[in-house]
Image: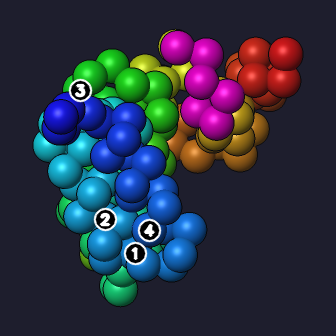
Amino acid sequence: MAQGYTPAILSLGDLHNEKSNYVEAASWYEKGALAGDIECMNVLGAYYARGTMGAPNGEKARHWFRKAADHGDAEGMASLGMIYFEGVAGTRADQAKGFEWLSKAAAQDFGPALTRMGKIYYNGEYVQRDYAKAREFFERAGG
């Protein structure tokens, strides 16, 4: 009998998530993440960032998003970047790190990162306002 097959582990987490059994879902996602499943890493990061199982925990969210990002995953990079840029649940914002991670995700043409980078330039957050760069990012994200 096969064991440790991460797509099945992810699916078990999803089943528990659908039934709002978040603690049990998180245990499956963590099992998958520890086995190297990037989607499980991102789901756990989101769980901790949103406080799905209680109070948000920015440090644990960063941990799991960083693991996904270290595997080259654009979603993990973008999520990590947004946490750094905004600061989440007791973590200090570090816009330089946030910008760095969002840029890495945008370099992979990840839509949410492209959109956030466009907003950063449009609003002049961390960088000097630049409508031309904002438009570039928005156009890349839109299509």
Q: Which residues are magenta?
A: 108-113
Q: To which residue does mark 1 refer?
A: 22
Which of the two discs, 1 and 4, labels the residue nearer the N terminus?
4
Looking at marks 2 and 3 on the same chain, the residue that comes earlier in the sequence is marked by: 2
Residue 61 position, x and y percent, is: 30, 58
Which residue: 48% across, 57% down? 14
Q: Nearer the viewer, residue 123 or 103?
A: 103
Q: Amino acid at mark 3?
A: Asp
Q: Which residue, given by chain and number where applicable, does mark 4 sit on?
A: 16
Callout 1 secondary element: helix
Give residue 26's mark: 2
* Vertical placement of residue 52 versus 126, above or below: below
Q: Earlier in the sequence, mark 3 or mark 4?
A: 4
Whether label 1 touches label 4, CB < 8 Å:
yes
Q: How far apart are the alpha carbons under marks 1 and 4?
A: 7 Å
Residue 86 makes an appearance in the image: no
Q: How is the image coloured?
A: rainbow
Q: Is residue 110 magenta?
A: yes
Residue 112, by quadrant, is top right
For residue 73, side relative to residue 138 (left or right)? left
Q: Secondary structure at mark 4?
A: helix
- Circle 3 Cα neighbour tier, 10 Å, few/some/many (<14 / 14–19 / ≥20): few
- What separation in Å lies between label 2 and label 3 (alpha carbons)? 21 Å
Instruction: Write down the residue under mark 3.
Output: 70
